Image: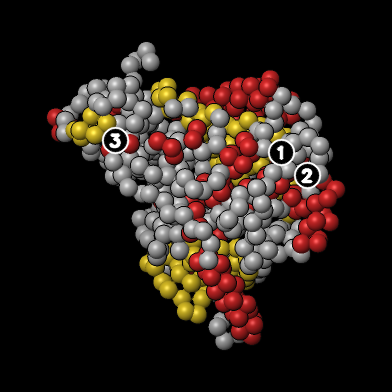
Amino acid sequence: MGTPPLSPWAVLVPTLVLVGLWAPCVVSRQPNFIVILADDVGWGDLGANWAETKETPHLDQLAAEGTRFVDFHSAASTCSPSRASLLTGRLGVRNGVTHNFAISSLGGLPLNETTLAEVLREAGYSTGAIGKWHLGHHGRHHPNSRGFDYYFGIPYSHDMGCTDTPGYNLPPCPPCPRHSPAASQEISQAPCLLCDKPGVPLPSRVARKDCYTEVALPLLENITIVQQPVELGSLARRYAEEAERFIQRASDKGRPFFLYLALAHMHVPLVPPLPPAAGRGIYGASLAEMDALVGRVKELADSLGRGSTLLWFTGDNGPWAQKCDLAGRLGPFVGAWQRQRGGSSAKQTTWEGGHRVPALVYWPGRVPARRTSQALLSILDIFPTLVALAGAALPPNRRFDGLDVSPVLFGWSDVGHKVLLHPNSGAAGKVGEIEALRLAQYKAFYTTGGAMACDGSTGPAQRHHPPLIFNLDRDIQEQEPLDVASREYQAVLPAISRAYAQALQDIAADNVSVADYSQDPAAIPCCNVQHVGCRCHEDH
């Protein structure tokens, strides 16, 4: 495969410099890759980032033994678009995934998009995905059809179905019903996906509210439902066990592996393993469980031999503020300008709290230990970086928003993106539309808005022409935009305007995909349609 050009506005390091930096790190053996993606985790949820956090000793140790990236960003501030960007290296306006898929979605990540797993499998890797998918589960959108040899997990967020142990959510959700109410007898005649009796109809009315009460949450191993509803209390343990089995199988075959571990933590519902202690309570106990899980995976990586495995930990977006005490810490990224006008400045928004996420990279002997990098990086960079480290080539005939940042990982450079785009993820405006832009230390907003906050308020959408511009070096809280009449504003506005226009032109000239967001109750994963809520047999 030929290597396509990166987007011209995304390239920031001269080609000759990249070649010079890259040449010494070519290795004879392909490294293993483990990418751990936490869900709804706050930048301040790591003790290494925020001193008030005490529940993450394993992650803090990972930071001490690797490199911590403090200006690292998700490609969107909600689930499906962020995950699609990680696996394609492209923003939602290119790959077609601009908002979340439903349990009844027929589509998913467009089939003409090439995933990181597909590239690495072609390069000789064993590929496994464990945990949350949320990129379509119907037909060819299932992870087994998107480059993953093995899949074990929940096909979407674990609040998108009822369970017998619903844990902690806000508002609280009831457990799955065991007897069908008379009002739930209405059924659809369409056959359902993954039924144990194909052609048997499925209940057609699925809740569109805070709690899903009619269909139980499924747990899949490859295309088979192994549990419905999921036992959430044992999920972390099962994910760790399946990760260990996958790594062992790959090792037995003598093949390098790519493991994509997409955790349920820290998304609600939270199901801490022990009664919450004093301090941060339920959230803190759940955070400690996630930390222990990451520590166990690091031990697995270390057991394979020093320097054989790169581990990359990050998050899909910022905390879900409307969940109040069940949401994570923003650290200093509070989006003060928005908070003064109502609404949350975290998940779903283009404020720093929505997309600035923790990021750690651990690779003994290659990635420097005890290093903190200020480079402007993104989840988009995981795709091209791992492809390069594997000695593979990027898919042709498309442009990428991510960069090969291996020189930054190795400590040879601390230069990342010059320009980074932030799409709307549901707070204000059209989903997927580029509403904010980062240029060096400056952040420009063309549209602002707040997601639902803990107090129930939302911030109204506001268009800004000319844009609001913040200097993040001086104002990390995004509290006071530059005065449009100031010399600083007038000096930086032309460069921001050019970068924004060039980015939109580049996207318009690209091979852009369109996702299918149509829905049909037949697409809902169902173990047994003859049981209430698709519940499996008790001995299943």
What residue would you read off at disc 1? Answer: 310
Relative depth, front residue between 291 and 516: 516
**Closer to us: mark 3 or mark 2?**
3
User: x and y percent of residue 17 in the render?
Assistant: 81, 61
Write down the quadrant of residue 442 in the picture.
bottom right
What residue would you read off at disc 2? Answer: 367
* Left or right: where 198 falls relative to 253: left
Q: Secondary structure at mark 3?
A: helix
Q: Amino acid at mark 3?
A: Ala
Q: Residue furthest left?
A: 182
User: Is there a contact, CB below 8 Å, between mark 2 and mark 1?
Assistant: yes
* Residue 522, numbered label: 3
* Residue 289 in view (yes/no): no
User: x and y percent of residue 157 in the render?
Assistant: 43, 39
The residue under the point 45% across, 69% down is: 447
Q: Residue furthest top?
A: 539
Q: Earlier in the sequence, mark 2 or mark 1?
A: 1
